[in-house]
Amino acid sequence: MKSHKHPLVTPTRSVDGGSWAGSRHVSPVETWLFNRLMDLMGDPAVSVHFWDGREHYRCPHSQPVGLMRFMDRTTFWRLLANPTLHFGDSFSAGRIQVEGDLVGFIEAVYDAKVRRTRPGALQALIKRGLMRPGRSNSLSDSRDNIFHHYDLGNDFYRLWLDDEMAYTCAYFADPRMTLEQAQAAKLDHIARKLQLRPGEQVVEAGCGWGGLARHFARHYGVHVRAYNISPSQIAYARERAQAEGLDDRIQYIQDDYRNIRGKYDVFVSVGMLEHVGVRDYKTLGRVIDRSLKDDGRGLIHSIGQNRPEPLSAWTVKRIFPGAYTPTLRQMMDIFENPGFSVVDVENLRLHYAKTLEHWLARYERHEGEVRKMFDDFFVRAWRLYLSASIANFRAGSFQLYQVVFTRPSKHDMAWTRAHLYQGQPPPQPRA
Protein backbone atom coordinates (compact mmCIF):
# COMPACT_ATOMS: atom_id res chain seq x y z
CA MET A 1 0.00 0.00 0.00
CA LYS A 2 3.01 2.30 -0.34
CA SER A 3 1.29 4.02 -3.28
CA HIS A 4 -1.69 5.14 -1.19
CA LYS A 5 -3.00 8.39 -2.75
CA HIS A 6 -3.97 10.14 0.47
CA PRO A 7 -2.76 13.79 0.38
CA LEU A 8 -0.51 13.24 3.40
CA VAL A 9 1.65 10.78 1.47
CA THR A 10 3.97 13.33 -0.10
CA PRO A 11 6.99 12.46 -2.22
CA THR A 12 10.19 14.08 -1.01
CA ARG A 13 12.94 15.55 -3.13
CA SER A 14 16.31 17.17 -2.61
CA VAL A 15 15.93 20.74 -1.42
CA ASP A 16 19.56 21.90 -1.64
CA GLY A 17 20.18 23.66 -4.92
CA GLY A 18 23.09 25.84 -6.03
CA SER A 19 26.41 26.54 -4.36
CA TRP A 20 25.00 28.97 -1.74
CA ALA A 21 22.17 26.63 -0.66
CA GLY A 22 24.56 23.70 -0.42
CA SER A 23 27.20 25.57 1.59
CA ARG A 24 27.84 24.39 5.15
CA HIS A 25 28.63 27.95 6.26
CA VAL A 26 26.16 29.65 8.61
CA SER A 27 26.01 33.43 8.40
CA PRO A 28 25.66 35.66 11.48
CA VAL A 29 22.38 36.94 10.03
CA GLU A 30 20.92 33.43 9.98
CA THR A 31 21.94 32.85 13.59
CA TRP A 32 20.52 36.22 14.66
CA LEU A 33 17.21 35.69 12.85
CA PHE A 34 16.67 32.30 14.40
CA ASN A 35 17.52 33.48 17.90
CA ARG A 36 15.15 36.42 17.42
CA LEU A 37 12.41 33.96 16.43
CA MET A 38 13.05 31.86 19.53
CA ASP A 39 13.04 34.98 21.72
CA LEU A 40 9.64 35.98 20.38
CA MET A 41 8.42 32.43 21.02
CA GLY A 42 9.37 32.79 24.68
CA ASP A 43 12.81 31.12 24.57
CA PRO A 44 11.72 27.47 24.78
CA ALA A 45 13.96 25.13 26.75
CA VAL A 46 15.54 23.44 23.73
CA SER A 47 18.82 23.38 21.83
CA VAL A 48 19.12 23.84 18.05
CA HIS A 49 21.97 22.76 15.78
CA PHE A 50 22.32 24.05 12.22
CA TRP A 51 23.54 22.22 9.12
CA ASP A 52 27.17 22.98 10.04
CA GLY A 53 26.77 20.65 13.04
CA ARG A 54 27.16 23.44 15.61
CA GLU A 55 24.76 24.70 18.26
CA HIS A 56 23.27 28.07 17.26
CA TYR A 57 20.54 28.35 19.86
CA ARG A 58 20.32 27.25 23.49
CA CYS A 59 17.66 28.38 25.95
CA PRO A 60 19.28 31.04 28.17
CA HIS A 61 17.03 30.31 31.15
CA SER A 62 17.03 26.54 31.66
CA GLN A 63 18.55 23.22 30.66
CA PRO A 64 17.39 22.07 27.19
CA VAL A 65 14.96 19.14 27.17
CA GLY A 66 15.72 18.18 23.58
CA LEU A 67 17.81 18.92 20.51
CA MET A 68 16.60 19.91 17.03
CA ARG A 69 18.83 19.63 13.97
CA PHE A 70 18.41 21.43 10.63
CA MET A 71 19.75 19.10 7.96
CA ASP A 72 20.18 21.84 5.34
CA ARG A 73 19.94 25.61 4.80
CA THR A 74 16.85 25.56 2.55
CA THR A 75 14.84 23.86 5.28
CA PHE A 76 15.91 26.63 7.69
CA TRP A 77 14.64 29.39 5.39
CA ARG A 78 11.40 27.58 4.69
CA LEU A 79 10.74 27.23 8.39
CA LEU A 80 11.56 30.89 8.97
CA ALA A 81 9.06 31.87 6.25
CA ASN A 82 6.20 29.83 7.75
CA PRO A 83 7.07 27.95 10.96
CA THR A 84 3.57 26.56 11.50
CA LEU A 85 3.60 24.77 8.14
CA HIS A 86 7.20 23.87 7.42
CA PHE A 87 8.26 22.46 10.77
CA GLY A 88 5.73 19.65 10.32
CA ASP A 89 6.56 18.99 6.67
CA SER A 90 10.32 19.16 7.27
CA PHE A 91 10.12 16.82 10.26
CA SER A 92 7.96 14.38 8.28
CA ALA A 93 10.45 14.44 5.41
CA GLY A 94 13.43 13.95 7.73
CA ARG A 95 14.86 17.42 6.95
CA ILE A 96 14.45 18.37 10.62
CA GLN A 97 15.41 15.83 13.25
CA VAL A 98 14.64 15.90 16.96
CA GLU A 99 16.86 14.05 19.39
CA GLY A 100 15.46 13.08 22.76
CA ASP A 101 11.79 12.88 23.77
CA LEU A 102 9.70 14.33 20.92
CA VAL A 103 6.72 15.06 23.17
CA GLY A 104 8.93 16.81 25.71
CA PHE A 105 10.60 18.87 22.99
CA ILE A 106 7.28 20.10 21.57
CA GLU A 107 5.86 20.66 25.05
CA ALA A 108 8.78 22.96 25.84
CA VAL A 109 7.94 25.02 22.74
CA TYR A 110 4.25 25.21 23.64
CA ASP A 111 5.03 26.01 27.29
CA ALA A 112 7.09 28.98 26.17
CA LYS A 113 4.36 30.11 23.76
CA VAL A 114 1.70 29.94 26.48
CA ARG A 115 3.88 31.94 28.88
CA ARG A 116 4.71 34.58 26.26
CA THR A 117 2.14 37.36 26.67
CA ARG A 118 3.59 40.27 24.68
CA PRO A 119 3.19 39.84 20.91
CA GLY A 120 5.93 41.06 18.64
CA ALA A 121 6.31 41.69 14.93
CA LEU A 122 7.51 38.18 14.16
CA GLN A 123 4.66 36.68 16.17
CA ALA A 124 2.27 38.71 14.01
CA LEU A 125 3.92 37.16 10.95
CA ILE A 126 3.48 33.68 12.44
CA LYS A 127 -0.16 34.41 13.17
CA ARG A 128 -0.71 35.49 9.58
CA GLY A 129 0.65 32.10 8.56
CA LEU A 130 -1.83 30.47 10.91
CA MET A 131 -4.68 32.53 9.49
CA ARG A 132 -4.30 31.30 5.94
CA PRO A 133 -7.68 29.98 4.88
CA GLY A 134 -8.21 26.23 4.80
CA ARG A 135 -11.07 24.25 3.39
CA SER A 136 -14.61 25.32 4.17
CA ASN A 137 -17.21 23.14 5.86
CA SER A 138 -19.96 23.23 3.25
CA LEU A 139 -21.87 20.00 2.69
CA SER A 140 -19.55 18.92 -0.14
CA ASP A 141 -16.32 20.16 1.43
CA SER A 142 -17.15 18.49 4.74
CA ARG A 143 -17.24 15.12 2.98
CA ASP A 144 -13.82 15.79 1.45
CA ASN A 145 -12.42 16.91 4.80
CA ILE A 146 -13.71 13.79 6.54
CA PHE A 147 -12.32 11.52 3.81
CA HIS A 148 -8.88 13.10 4.26
CA HIS A 149 -8.66 12.03 7.90
CA TYR A 150 -11.19 9.34 8.82
CA ASP A 151 -11.21 7.22 5.69
CA LEU A 152 -7.56 6.22 5.89
CA GLY A 153 -8.89 2.73 6.58
CA ASN A 154 -10.34 0.98 9.60
CA ASP A 155 -7.30 -1.31 9.71
CA PHE A 156 -5.06 1.68 10.37
CA TYR A 157 -7.11 3.02 13.29
CA ARG A 158 -7.69 -0.46 14.70
CA LEU A 159 -3.93 -0.71 15.35
CA TRP A 160 -3.91 1.96 18.06
CA LEU A 161 -7.46 2.76 19.20
CA ASP A 162 -9.38 0.77 21.83
CA ASP A 163 -11.64 -2.19 21.09
CA GLU A 164 -14.65 0.08 20.46
CA MET A 165 -12.66 2.34 18.08
CA ALA A 166 -13.29 5.45 20.18
CA TYR A 167 -11.34 8.37 18.71
CA THR A 168 -12.16 10.95 21.38
CA CYS A 169 -10.97 11.83 24.87
CA ALA A 170 -11.35 9.03 27.43
CA TYR A 171 -12.24 9.59 31.10
CA PHE A 172 -9.71 8.26 33.60
CA ALA A 173 -11.77 8.16 36.80
CA ASP A 174 -8.80 6.15 38.09
CA PRO A 175 -5.40 6.91 36.49
CA ARG A 176 -4.62 3.16 36.53
CA MET A 177 -7.46 2.40 34.10
CA THR A 178 -6.70 0.76 30.78
CA LEU A 179 -7.64 2.67 27.64
CA GLU A 180 -10.63 0.40 27.16
CA GLN A 181 -11.85 0.99 30.70
CA ALA A 182 -11.39 4.76 30.42
CA GLN A 183 -13.29 4.97 27.12
CA ALA A 184 -16.23 3.06 28.66
CA ALA A 185 -16.03 5.35 31.71
CA LYS A 186 -16.27 8.37 29.37
CA LEU A 187 -19.52 7.07 27.90
CA ASP A 188 -20.97 6.38 31.36
CA HIS A 189 -19.89 9.87 32.48
CA ILE A 190 -21.77 11.39 29.54
CA ALA A 191 -24.83 9.18 30.08
CA ARG A 192 -25.04 10.25 33.73
CA LYS A 193 -24.72 13.90 32.75
CA LEU A 194 -27.60 13.44 30.32
CA GLN A 195 -29.62 11.44 32.89
CA LEU A 196 -30.65 8.90 30.27
CA ARG A 197 -33.84 6.95 30.89
CA PRO A 198 -34.88 3.67 29.22
CA GLY A 199 -36.98 4.13 26.11
CA GLU A 200 -35.80 7.66 25.34
CA GLN A 201 -34.93 8.78 21.82
CA VAL A 202 -31.36 10.01 21.35
CA VAL A 203 -29.84 11.65 18.28
CA GLU A 204 -26.07 11.71 17.85
CA ALA A 205 -24.28 14.08 15.47
CA GLY A 206 -20.97 12.68 14.23
CA CYS A 207 -20.93 9.12 15.57
CA GLY A 208 -17.47 7.95 14.49
CA TRP A 209 -17.34 4.15 14.55
CA GLY A 210 -20.57 4.01 16.56
CA GLY A 211 -19.34 3.10 20.03
CA LEU A 212 -21.44 5.68 21.92
CA ALA A 213 -24.68 4.52 20.30
CA ARG A 214 -23.90 0.87 21.06
CA HIS A 215 -23.02 1.65 24.69
CA PHE A 216 -26.11 3.78 25.27
CA ALA A 217 -28.43 1.23 23.67
CA ARG A 218 -26.91 -1.72 25.51
CA HIS A 219 -26.52 -0.23 28.99
CA TYR A 220 -29.18 2.47 29.17
CA GLY A 221 -32.04 1.06 27.10
CA VAL A 222 -32.39 4.06 24.79
CA HIS A 223 -32.96 4.21 21.04
CA VAL A 224 -30.26 6.05 19.08
CA ARG A 225 -30.23 7.59 15.63
CA ALA A 226 -26.60 8.39 14.78
CA TYR A 227 -25.43 10.56 11.85
CA ASN A 228 -22.02 10.48 10.17
CA ILE A 229 -20.73 11.25 6.67
CA SER A 230 -17.82 8.78 6.66
CA PRO A 231 -18.78 5.69 4.60
CA SER A 232 -16.16 3.42 6.18
CA GLN A 233 -17.15 4.37 9.72
CA ILE A 234 -20.86 3.91 9.06
CA ALA A 235 -20.27 0.50 7.45
CA TYR A 236 -18.22 -0.61 10.45
CA ALA A 237 -20.82 0.70 12.93
CA ARG A 238 -23.69 -1.09 11.18
CA GLU A 239 -21.79 -4.38 11.12
CA ARG A 240 -21.01 -4.14 14.82
CA ALA A 241 -24.58 -3.26 15.79
CA GLN A 242 -25.98 -6.19 13.79
CA ALA A 243 -23.42 -8.64 15.15
CA GLU A 244 -24.17 -7.56 18.73
CA GLY A 245 -27.94 -7.70 18.33
CA LEU A 246 -28.42 -3.95 18.73
CA ASP A 247 -29.65 -2.98 15.28
CA ASP A 248 -33.26 -2.86 16.52
CA ARG A 249 -32.30 0.02 18.83
CA ILE A 250 -29.74 1.86 16.68
CA GLN A 251 -30.03 3.45 13.27
CA TYR A 252 -26.77 4.61 11.70
CA ILE A 253 -27.37 7.19 8.97
CA GLN A 254 -24.74 8.25 6.46
CA ASP A 255 -25.58 11.94 6.24
CA ASP A 256 -24.54 15.38 7.43
CA TYR A 257 -25.66 16.74 10.81
CA ARG A 258 -27.47 19.55 8.97
CA ASN A 259 -29.91 16.98 7.62
CA ILE A 260 -30.98 15.59 11.01
CA ARG A 261 -34.74 15.08 11.10
CA GLY A 262 -37.18 14.08 13.83
CA LYS A 263 -37.79 14.94 17.49
CA TYR A 264 -35.64 13.59 20.32
CA ASP A 265 -35.31 13.64 24.08
CA VAL A 266 -31.53 13.99 23.90
CA PHE A 267 -28.97 15.50 21.51
CA VAL A 268 -25.35 14.43 21.88
CA SER A 269 -22.21 15.17 19.89
CA VAL A 270 -18.76 13.89 20.88
CA GLY A 271 -15.78 15.06 18.84
CA MET A 272 -17.67 16.55 15.89
CA LEU A 273 -17.74 20.26 16.73
CA GLU A 274 -14.07 20.59 15.75
CA HIS A 275 -15.20 19.94 12.15
CA VAL A 276 -18.21 22.29 12.07
CA GLY A 277 -16.49 25.67 11.81
CA VAL A 278 -17.41 28.81 13.76
CA ARG A 279 -19.44 30.22 10.88
CA ASP A 280 -21.83 27.26 11.16
CA TYR A 281 -22.32 27.25 14.94
CA LYS A 282 -25.63 29.10 14.63
CA THR A 283 -26.70 26.57 12.01
CA LEU A 284 -25.88 23.77 14.44
CA GLY A 285 -27.88 25.59 17.11
CA ARG A 286 -30.91 25.72 14.81
CA VAL A 287 -30.55 21.99 14.05
CA ILE A 288 -30.51 21.19 17.77
CA ASP A 289 -33.45 23.53 18.40
CA ARG A 290 -35.68 21.86 15.82
CA SER A 291 -34.57 18.38 16.93
CA LEU A 292 -35.12 18.57 20.70
CA LYS A 293 -38.47 18.07 22.36
CA ASP A 294 -39.83 20.74 24.70
CA ASP A 295 -38.14 19.09 27.72
CA GLY A 296 -35.03 18.01 25.83
CA ARG A 297 -31.41 18.28 26.88
CA GLY A 298 -28.05 17.74 25.26
CA LEU A 299 -24.28 17.54 25.55
CA ILE A 300 -21.46 18.68 23.27
CA HIS A 301 -17.95 17.32 23.84
CA SER A 302 -15.22 19.18 21.95
CA ILE A 303 -11.56 20.11 21.93
CA GLY A 304 -11.25 23.81 22.74
CA GLN A 305 -8.72 26.52 23.43
CA ASN A 306 -8.31 29.64 25.58
CA ARG A 307 -7.90 32.18 22.79
CA PRO A 308 -9.47 32.22 19.31
CA GLU A 309 -6.56 31.07 17.13
CA PRO A 310 -6.64 28.71 14.14
CA LEU A 311 -4.92 25.37 14.23
CA SER A 312 -1.42 25.33 12.79
CA ALA A 313 -1.18 25.55 9.02
CA TRP A 314 0.43 22.08 8.96
CA THR A 315 -2.36 20.46 10.98
CA VAL A 316 -5.02 21.99 8.72
CA LYS A 317 -3.19 21.02 5.52
CA ARG A 318 -1.93 17.56 6.40
CA ILE A 319 -4.11 16.17 9.19
CA PHE A 320 -7.43 17.94 9.83
CA PRO A 321 -8.57 20.09 6.86
CA GLY A 322 -11.44 22.37 7.79
CA ALA A 323 -10.89 21.85 11.54
CA TYR A 324 -11.06 24.49 14.27
CA THR A 325 -11.03 24.24 18.06
CA PRO A 326 -13.30 26.88 19.62
CA THR A 327 -13.03 28.93 22.77
CA LEU A 328 -15.75 28.42 25.34
CA ARG A 329 -17.15 31.85 24.45
CA GLN A 330 -17.39 30.87 20.78
CA MET A 331 -19.26 27.69 21.71
CA MET A 332 -21.96 29.84 23.25
CA ASP A 333 -23.04 30.87 19.73
CA ILE A 334 -24.59 27.42 19.48
CA PHE A 335 -26.81 27.93 22.51
CA GLU A 336 -27.65 31.64 22.70
CA ASN A 337 -29.91 32.17 19.68
CA PRO A 338 -32.17 29.15 20.41
CA GLY A 339 -32.25 30.25 24.06
CA PHE A 340 -30.78 27.09 25.58
CA SER A 341 -29.61 27.11 29.20
CA VAL A 342 -26.04 25.91 29.79
CA VAL A 343 -26.29 23.92 33.02
CA ASP A 344 -22.84 22.33 33.31
CA VAL A 345 -19.35 22.81 31.87
CA GLU A 346 -16.40 20.51 32.60
CA ASN A 347 -12.84 20.65 31.30
CA LEU A 348 -11.13 17.25 30.85
CA ARG A 349 -7.86 18.60 29.39
CA LEU A 350 -5.45 16.28 31.20
CA HIS A 351 -7.68 13.28 30.51
CA TYR A 352 -7.09 13.91 26.81
CA ALA A 353 -3.33 14.14 27.32
CA LYS A 354 -3.43 10.72 28.99
CA THR A 355 -5.66 9.31 26.23
CA LEU A 356 -3.16 10.45 23.62
CA GLU A 357 -0.29 8.92 25.58
CA HIS A 358 -2.03 5.55 25.23
CA TRP A 359 -2.63 6.13 21.52
CA LEU A 360 0.98 7.14 20.83
CA ALA A 361 2.35 4.12 22.73
CA ARG A 362 0.14 1.78 20.69
CA TYR A 363 0.97 3.58 17.44
CA GLU A 364 4.70 3.18 18.10
CA ARG A 365 4.26 -0.51 18.97
CA HIS A 366 2.59 -1.02 15.59
CA GLU A 367 4.84 1.26 13.56
CA GLY A 368 6.01 -1.63 11.39
CA GLU A 369 2.45 -2.40 10.36
CA VAL A 370 1.74 1.27 9.66
CA ARG A 371 4.83 1.38 7.47
CA LYS A 372 3.43 -1.46 5.35
CA MET A 373 0.33 0.67 4.68
CA PHE A 374 1.94 4.08 4.12
CA ASP A 375 5.30 5.70 3.35
CA ASP A 376 7.90 7.14 5.72
CA PHE A 377 6.49 10.68 5.41
CA PHE A 378 3.10 9.47 6.68
CA VAL A 379 4.62 7.44 9.53
CA ARG A 380 6.64 10.40 10.80
CA ALA A 381 3.76 12.84 10.29
CA TRP A 382 1.38 10.83 12.43
CA ARG A 383 3.97 10.38 15.15
CA LEU A 384 4.38 14.16 15.13
CA TYR A 385 0.61 14.74 15.17
CA LEU A 386 0.03 12.47 18.18
CA SER A 387 3.10 13.81 20.01
CA ALA A 388 2.18 17.45 19.39
CA SER A 389 -1.38 16.79 20.56
CA ILE A 390 -0.10 15.41 23.87
CA ALA A 391 2.14 18.48 24.24
CA ASN A 392 -0.74 20.85 23.44
CA PHE A 393 -2.95 19.41 26.16
CA ARG A 394 -0.13 19.21 28.72
CA ALA A 395 0.89 22.82 28.09
CA GLY A 396 -2.69 24.06 28.27
CA SER A 397 -2.85 25.21 24.63
CA PHE A 398 -5.78 22.84 24.11
CA GLN A 399 -8.75 22.18 26.39
CA LEU A 400 -11.48 19.53 26.33
CA TYR A 401 -14.93 20.89 27.08
CA GLN A 402 -18.10 18.98 27.89
CA VAL A 403 -21.09 21.35 27.87
CA VAL A 404 -24.53 20.22 29.07
CA PHE A 405 -27.53 22.31 28.01
CA THR A 406 -31.33 22.16 28.30
CA ARG A 407 -34.47 23.99 27.37
CA PRO A 408 -34.83 26.89 29.84
CA SER A 409 -38.11 25.52 31.21
CA LYS A 410 -36.62 22.15 32.19
CA HIS A 411 -36.54 21.92 35.99
CA ASP A 412 -35.87 18.23 36.70
CA MET A 413 -32.10 18.10 36.13
CA ALA A 414 -29.97 16.98 39.09
CA TRP A 415 -29.27 19.67 41.68
CA THR A 416 -25.70 18.50 42.37
CA ARG A 417 -22.95 16.54 40.64
CA ALA A 418 -23.00 13.73 43.19
CA HIS A 419 -24.57 11.24 40.76
CA LEU A 420 -21.66 11.69 38.36
CA TYR A 421 -19.18 10.22 40.79
CA GLN A 422 -21.29 7.80 42.86
CA GLY A 423 -22.69 6.02 39.81
CA GLN A 424 -26.24 6.31 41.10
CA PRO A 425 -29.32 7.75 39.34
CA PRO A 426 -29.63 11.45 40.20
CA PRO A 427 -32.23 12.47 42.79
CA GLN A 428 -35.10 14.41 41.25
CA PRO A 429 -35.87 17.78 42.85
CA ARG A 430 -39.37 18.40 44.10
CA ALA A 431 -41.65 20.52 41.93
Image (cartoon, helix red, strand yellow):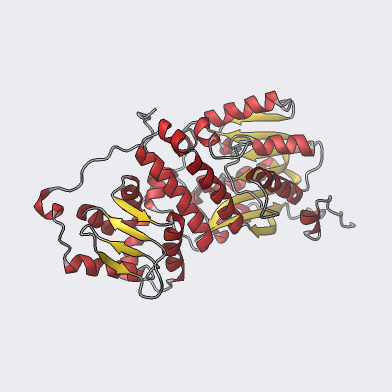
Q: Looking at the picture, tell me which residue is in the foreground, 243 or 293.
A: 243
Q: Looking at the picture, tell me which residue is in the foreground, 342 or 111.
A: 111
Looking at the rendering, which quadrant does residue 43 occupy?
A: bottom left
Name the residue furthest left.
19
Residue 144 in view of the camera: no
142 over 431 or under it: above or below: above
Residue 94 spot, x, y in % from top left: 31, 47
Name the residue furthest right.
430
Left or right of 233 on screen, residue 96:
left
299 over 67 or under it: above or below: above
Q: Looking at the picture, tell me which residue is in the foreground, 138 or 216.
A: 216
119 over 363 or under it: above or below: below
Residue 428 in view of the camera: yes
Name the residue furthest bottom.
61
The total number of labels drawn is 0
413 over 108 or under it: above or below: above
Residue 90 spot, x, y in % from top left: 31, 49
At 53% across and 29% down in the image, what residue appears? Answer: 232
At 49% across and 63% down in the image, what residue appears? Answer: 307
The N terminus lies in which quarter of the figure?
top left
Residue 406 spot, x, y in % from top left: 72, 52
At 37% across and 51% down in the image, what residue appears? Answer: 313
Residue 191 spot, x, y in % from top left: 74, 46
Looking at the rendering, which quadrant does residue 268 occupy?
A: top right
The C terminus lies in which quarter of the figure?
bottom right
At 23% across and 67% down in the image, what residue appears? Answer: 31
Left or right of 139 on screen, residue 36:
left
